[in-house]
Image (cartoon, rainbow, N blue to C red):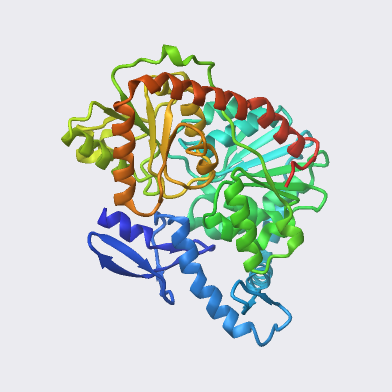
Amino acid sequence: MAGDAKRRLRIWQSSGSFAAVPHTQPVGNEQIFTPQQPVLHQLPDEAFVPRPDHIEASFEPIRQEVAAQYVRRLPSCTRQGDQGKNVPQVIFRLLLLKRRIESLLMLPLVAVGYFYGLAGSRWSHLETVFFFPFYHTGGAEKIHAQIAQSCGSKNALIVFTRHSRDGRFKEDFSASGCTILDISRLTGSKWLYPVNFILRGVWAARLNRCRRLHTIFNGHSNFAYKLSPWLRKSIRQVDLVHSWNSFSLIRIPYIPFYAASVQISQVQLKKHQEKYAGYGVEQRYIDRFHFIQNSVPFPVRAASGKPRQPFIAVFSGRPGPEKRFPLFARVARLAQQENLPVQFRAIGISESDAGTASGIVECLGNISDAHIIHDLLYESRVLLLTSSTEGFPLVVIEAMANGCAVFATPVGDIPLHTGNGQPGVLFSTSTNETAIVAEAMSGLRKMVGDPDSWDRIAQANIDYAQERFSMSVFDAAYRKLILTHENPPA
């Protein structure tokens, strides 16, 4: 845990080359983040991308320092703050200036690539291009694959720009009918960064020559953001933003090139609008955010068919620090000490990931078969999520559709669907880990002690999922956005 805490405190800036390392104060067994003026250190390529709250905390001192330096020069760029103080609104302008200077400096390399791209064969059939970083295991990758399946065709191209850890969703992307191209060997390496500049020119030339190309969809691809200024204006560019994270800052200098930005979380959409307004982003760009609810195919289930024994609490997620599997393991350990008749399972966590917790949690590792995942959820009574940050995880939809009660932290859009009149437990905090464990234990004790409520809870959540999370609505919204250029409601 100490190693994870140190890694979380390394904050990648948009260039990916340096990080701000904030000060920490030990409190008990925890490391408490205390932002101060950051010190720049060189980081290895594999450095971890931190939690969004750490990114925001580390970015704030930079914002304040820059604002203090420029407020006298830009007196017109001030607005009234929440406490009645003038808050400088210069970050957006400075980031735009930074991008323009960088573009000027890299122009010779981009030009070399552009002329090379002009000599290549013409992709005359392309109408839509999707840029995604990965096809490995992950909720974002699952959504990206569903979007490709909804809007893909033989006249579409999918480009992967980062190295994937596994091939979990590669077949799902292939099922879209799109041509698949993986350029991660060239675009995913820091050691080949000058080549990245040349590739921007190559891709700009090839895509600008595609006269039938009408839309480029960017799902969290850094390369696609850096490519966006070099594309002709008649190509409509759309991006997808899952939650407030490092990409929320990386994309700021490039938002003028995007006609629409999709948010999958109403809470995160509002947060982006507020943060961007604070950074001085023009309202016309803020108004380009639109909400489309995530969804996922799921079977039609009956509550009466759920197994009553054993009582299973399940975790689903990758072993990243934001998912906080160790908290789930702490709940399992306490339940074992109390002899509470609950079995604990973890989807997406291997025994090596779990370490000593594998003795009390059945670790199933990555599962690629959706039918198996749905069956595992149907066998379970509780989905227990301990995440520090989320947009709106697909597993919540899958769990509710399979009759699970959802016990979760109040992050992203989870509070809109859990504990808000729906059976389940919405924890009172996402930061106090002791309280999360205590509230999870309290909810398990209550539910285990009231077996008569199990079918009622299961049926209520099944009905809710079938009513709210229709794949037909999801498909229609993305088809309008990408194929017919109709924006969903803001």
The image shows residue 344 at horizontal and vertical percentages of 28, 30
Q: Quadrant of residue 31?
A: bottom left
Q: Which residue occupies the foreground of this view, 86 or 362? A: 86
Tell me if residue 199 can be seen. Answer: no
Tell me if residue 22 can be seen. Answer: yes
Q: Quadrant of residue 317?
A: top left
Q: Which residue occupies the foreground of this view, 287 or 6? A: 287
Q: Is residue 192 above or below residue 262?
A: below
Query: Could you tell me how many numbered marks the image carries?
Result: 0
Q: Is residue 449 above or below residue 204?
A: above
The image shows residue 49 at horizontal and vertical percentages of 44, 55
The image shows residue 119 at horizontal and vertical percentages of 74, 47
Q: Residue at x 26, y 65 (%)?
A: 27
198 on left or right of 170: right
Q: Residue at x 29, y 50 (%)?
A: 434
Q: Which residue occupies the foreground of this view, 64 or 176? A: 64
Question: Which residue in the rendered view is the most extreme toward the bottom?
Answer: 72
The image shows residue 161 at horizontal and vertical percentages of 56, 45
Q: Quadrant of residue 19?
A: bottom left
